[in-house]
Amino acid sequence: MLAHVDDSAIDLLMAHAPGARLIWAHTGIGGAPAERVRALLKKYPKLMGELSYRPGLTESGGGLSPEWKALLSDHSDRFLVGSDTWINARWAGYEGLMSDARRWLADLPETAAKRIAWENGARLFGLPLAP
Protein backbone atom coordinates (compact mmCIF):
# COMPACT_ATOMS: atom_id res chain seq x y z
CA MET A 1 0.00 0.00 0.00
CA LEU A 2 1.21 3.52 -0.80
CA ALA A 3 0.26 6.04 1.88
CA HIS A 4 0.44 9.77 1.24
CA VAL A 5 0.22 10.77 4.91
CA ASP A 6 2.01 12.46 7.80
CA ASP A 7 3.86 10.56 10.51
CA SER A 8 0.95 10.37 12.95
CA ALA A 9 -1.13 8.57 10.32
CA ILE A 10 1.54 5.86 10.04
CA ASP A 11 0.72 4.75 13.57
CA LEU A 12 -3.01 4.73 12.76
CA LEU A 13 -2.57 2.76 9.53
CA MET A 14 -0.25 0.21 11.07
CA ALA A 15 -2.57 -0.27 14.05
CA HIS A 16 -5.35 -1.04 11.58
CA ALA A 17 -3.26 -3.36 9.37
CA PRO A 18 -0.16 -4.43 11.31
CA GLY A 19 0.96 -6.97 8.70
CA ALA A 20 0.72 -4.59 5.74
CA ARG A 21 3.70 -3.60 3.62
CA LEU A 22 3.45 0.18 3.60
CA ILE A 23 5.32 2.55 1.29
CA TRP A 24 5.29 6.00 2.88
CA ALA A 25 5.08 8.63 0.14
CA HIS A 26 7.71 11.35 0.59
CA THR A 27 8.59 9.64 3.88
CA GLY A 28 6.14 12.02 5.40
CA ILE A 29 4.20 15.06 4.36
CA GLY A 30 5.34 18.05 6.35
CA GLY A 31 8.84 16.76 6.92
CA ALA A 32 8.91 14.54 9.99
CA PRO A 33 12.42 14.76 11.46
CA ALA A 34 14.88 11.99 10.62
CA GLU A 35 14.79 10.71 14.21
CA ARG A 36 11.01 10.30 14.05
CA VAL A 37 11.39 8.40 10.79
CA ARG A 38 14.07 6.22 12.41
CA ALA A 39 11.72 5.44 15.31
CA LEU A 40 8.88 4.49 12.95
CA LEU A 41 11.17 2.22 10.92
CA LYS A 42 12.19 0.47 14.13
CA LYS A 43 8.58 0.11 15.28
CA TYR A 44 7.23 -1.11 11.91
CA PRO A 45 9.52 -3.57 10.12
CA LYS A 46 7.41 -3.53 6.92
CA LEU A 47 7.44 0.27 6.57
CA MET A 48 9.39 1.64 3.62
CA GLY A 49 10.05 5.27 2.78
CA GLU A 50 9.72 6.78 -0.69
CA LEU A 51 11.96 9.83 -1.07
CA SER A 52 10.52 12.15 -3.73
CA TYR A 53 10.03 15.73 -2.57
CA ARG A 54 11.22 14.91 0.94
CA PRO A 55 11.71 18.13 2.92
CA GLY A 56 15.07 18.25 4.73
CA LEU A 57 16.59 15.38 2.76
CA THR A 58 19.15 17.57 1.03
CA GLU A 59 21.08 20.73 1.77
CA SER A 60 21.38 23.78 -0.48
CA GLY A 61 24.00 22.16 -2.76
CA GLY A 62 21.83 19.11 -3.39
CA GLY A 63 23.80 16.75 -1.17
CA LEU A 64 22.29 14.83 1.72
CA SER A 65 21.85 16.53 5.07
CA PRO A 66 23.95 14.81 7.77
CA GLU A 67 20.96 13.33 9.61
CA TRP A 68 19.48 11.87 6.43
CA LYS A 69 22.82 10.54 5.26
CA ALA A 70 23.10 8.65 8.55
CA LEU A 71 19.50 7.38 8.38
CA LEU A 72 19.73 6.25 4.75
CA SER A 73 23.10 4.60 5.38
CA ASP A 74 21.77 2.76 8.43
CA HIS A 75 18.51 1.67 6.77
CA SER A 76 19.32 1.50 3.07
CA ASP A 77 17.09 -1.56 2.75
CA ARG A 78 14.01 0.48 3.72
CA PHE A 79 13.98 3.38 1.22
CA LEU A 80 13.08 3.91 -2.45
CA VAL A 81 13.79 6.68 -4.93
CA GLY A 82 10.56 8.14 -6.29
CA SER A 83 9.55 10.81 -8.79
CA ASP A 84 6.04 11.93 -7.76
CA THR A 85 4.92 12.06 -11.38
CA TRP A 86 1.28 12.09 -10.37
CA ILE A 87 0.09 14.04 -13.44
CA ASN A 88 1.29 13.90 -17.05
CA ALA A 89 2.82 17.38 -16.90
CA ARG A 90 5.26 16.22 -14.18
CA TRP A 91 6.96 13.88 -16.64
CA ALA A 92 8.51 16.88 -18.39
CA GLY A 93 10.77 17.36 -15.37
CA TYR A 94 11.54 13.68 -14.82
CA GLU A 95 15.18 13.79 -15.95
CA GLY A 96 15.85 16.70 -13.59
CA LEU A 97 14.28 14.80 -10.70
CA MET A 98 16.45 11.78 -11.40
CA SER A 99 19.52 13.99 -11.76
CA ASP A 100 18.79 15.43 -8.33
CA ALA A 101 18.40 11.92 -6.91
CA ARG A 102 21.70 10.83 -8.46
CA ARG A 103 23.37 13.79 -6.77
CA TRP A 104 22.30 12.84 -3.25
CA LEU A 105 22.69 9.10 -3.87
CA ALA A 106 26.36 9.83 -4.63
CA ASP A 107 26.76 10.88 -0.97
CA LEU A 108 26.02 7.32 0.18
CA PRO A 109 28.19 4.21 0.15
CA GLU A 110 27.77 2.46 -3.22
CA THR A 111 25.90 -0.54 -1.76
CA ALA A 112 23.39 1.71 0.03
CA ALA A 113 22.90 3.88 -3.06
CA LYS A 114 22.18 0.84 -5.25
CA ARG A 115 19.63 -0.48 -2.79
CA ILE A 116 17.77 2.82 -2.62
CA ALA A 117 18.06 3.60 -6.33
CA TRP A 118 16.61 0.35 -7.63
CA GLU A 119 17.29 -2.88 -5.72
CA ASN A 120 14.68 -2.29 -3.01
CA GLY A 121 12.05 -1.52 -5.61
CA ALA A 122 12.97 -4.59 -7.63
CA ARG A 123 12.70 -6.80 -4.55
CA LEU A 124 9.44 -5.20 -3.46
CA PHE A 125 7.81 -5.81 -6.82
CA GLY A 126 9.35 -9.23 -7.45
CA LEU A 127 11.67 -8.18 -10.27
CA PRO A 128 15.05 -9.84 -10.83
CA LEU A 129 18.16 -8.09 -9.60
CA ALA A 130 20.89 -7.45 -12.13
CA PRO A 131 23.98 -9.64 -11.71
Image: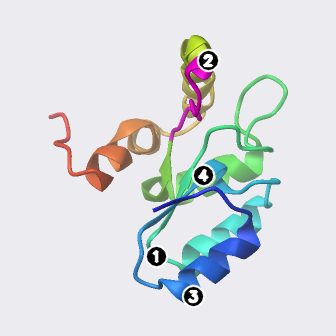
Mark toward the start of the polypeptide (1 vs 4): 4
Mark toward the start of the polypeptide (2 vs 1): 1
Question: Which one is nearer the viewer's eye here, 101 or 68?
Answer: 101
Q: Is residue 99 visible?
A: no
Cα separation between marks 3 and 2: 36 Å
Question: Which one is nearer the viewer's eye here, 44 or 113?
Answer: 44
**Quarter of the rendering containing residue 5:** bottom right
Q: Amino acid at mark 2?
A: Ala
**Quarter of the rendering containing residue 74:** bottom right
Span shown in magenta: 81-90
Label 3 secondary element: helix
Q: Which of labels 4 and 2 is toward the front?
A: 2
The residue under label 2 is 89
- 131 sits to left or right of 65: left
Mark toward the start of the polypeptide (3 vs 2): 3
Q: Which of labels 1 and 4 is toward the front?
A: 4
Q: Are marks 1 and 4 in contact (CB under 8 Å)?
A: no
Q: Are marks 4 and 3 in contact (CB under 8 Å)?
A: no
Mark 4 closeness class: few <14, some 14–19, many ≥20 residues within 10 Å: many
The residue under label 4 is 25
